[in-house]
Each structure stands twice: as C-alpha cells, then as structure tokens.
C-alpha cells in the first residue's frame, strides 16, 4: 500500500498506520470457540471473567497476541494459556479436541458470543 503497488487492502485495526487512509467496512462481534458439551456452550453471552481458569489457545502473532492479552487484562482476568500457535487453523481446531477454549476475534464489550466447534471445522 505504502509503495503504491496496491490500491486497496482489507485488514484488522491492530496496527494503525498514519500513512494510510482507512474506513471501517464492518465490525465483528467477539466470540469464543468452545467444545460441544462445555458448561458455557449453550449460553447466548459469555464474559471473559467466566473463562477464567479455562485452558486457552492463544493466537501467538505479534499484534494478535498483544490484542488478546490486552482484552483479558482490561477485564482483570489472567488467562490460563495452555497452547500457543501462529496458525489460526490450529487455534480454531484445539477447542474441538476438548483441549482448550479459544478467543479468536473481537474486542471486550458486554461479553463474547459462544460458538460450539468440533475438530475439522
């Protein structure tokens, strides 16, 4: 974008760059991936405080890591990070194997929308 090679890019607002003009196209609500049968899976809303003590798979990329850890810190919750991966696919698959919960997107607002997952999705 900066060099002029591309005229349009889509991305997240994780690392704003003052050299680029940006417009918000849409906002994604936060959600948490839970294994089927998890005690919180049937709820319409889950807070980060309710996830305290649950094993977490962290998307371990520089800006994503800081973003997710900042969400937990803002909520006063210390996450129990059991797995770290730079692969979105791995982070999404771990809850299906009942190994962890995963908070892959969004920012802390009133709560997270639970999404039941299983391996291979």
Image (cartoon, rainbow, N blue to C red):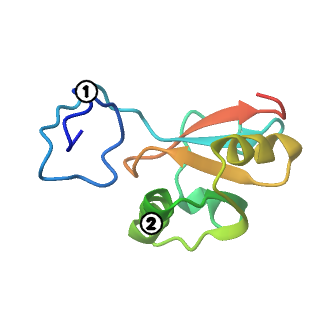
Could you tell me which secondary element the residue under label 1 belongs to? loop
Could you tell me which secondary element the residue under label 2 belongs to? helix
Quick one: 4 or 87, which is closer to the camera?
Answer: 4
Residue highlighted by disc 1: 8
Above or below, 120 relative to 93: above
Question: Hey, which quadrant is residue 121 in on the image?
Answer: top right
Q: Position of residue 37 (x, y in %)?
A: 84, 38
Question: Hey, which quadrant is residue 1 in on the image?
Answer: top left
Question: Hey, which quadrant is residue 8 in on the image?
Answer: top left
Q: Give the residue drawn at x 57%, y 33%.
A: 44
Q: Position of residue 65 (x, y in %)?
A: 51, 63
- Which one is earlier in the sequence, the residue at label 2 or at label 1? 1
Q: Residues within 10 Å of mark 2 (few under 14, many from 20)?
A: few
Q: Is residue 25 left or right of residue 116?
A: left
**Whether residue 30 can be seen here:** yes
Q: Give the residue drawn at x 71%, y 38%.
A: 41
Q: Give the residue drawn at x 70%, y 40%.
A: 89
**Whether residue 42 can be seen here:** no
Q: Residues within 10 Å of mark 1 (few under 14, many from 20)?
A: few
Which labelled disc corresponds to residue 66? 2
Q: Position of residue 52 (x, y in %)?
A: 63, 66
């Amino acid at each position: 974008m900066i060099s002029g090679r591309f005229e349009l890019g889509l991305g997240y607002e994780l690392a704003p760059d003052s050299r680029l003009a940006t417009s918000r196209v849409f906002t994604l609500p936060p959600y948490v991936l839970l294994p089927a049968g998890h005690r919180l899976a049937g709820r319409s809303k889950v807070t980060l405080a309710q996830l305290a003590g649950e094993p977490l798979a962290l998307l371990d990329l520089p800006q994503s890591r800081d973003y997710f850890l900042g969400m937990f810190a803002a909520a006063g919750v210390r996450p129990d990070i059991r797995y770290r991966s730079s692969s979105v696919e791995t982070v999404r698959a771990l809850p299906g194997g009942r190994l962890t919960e995963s908070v892959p997107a969004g920012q802390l607002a009133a709560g997270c929308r639970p999404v039941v997952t299983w391996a291979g999705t």
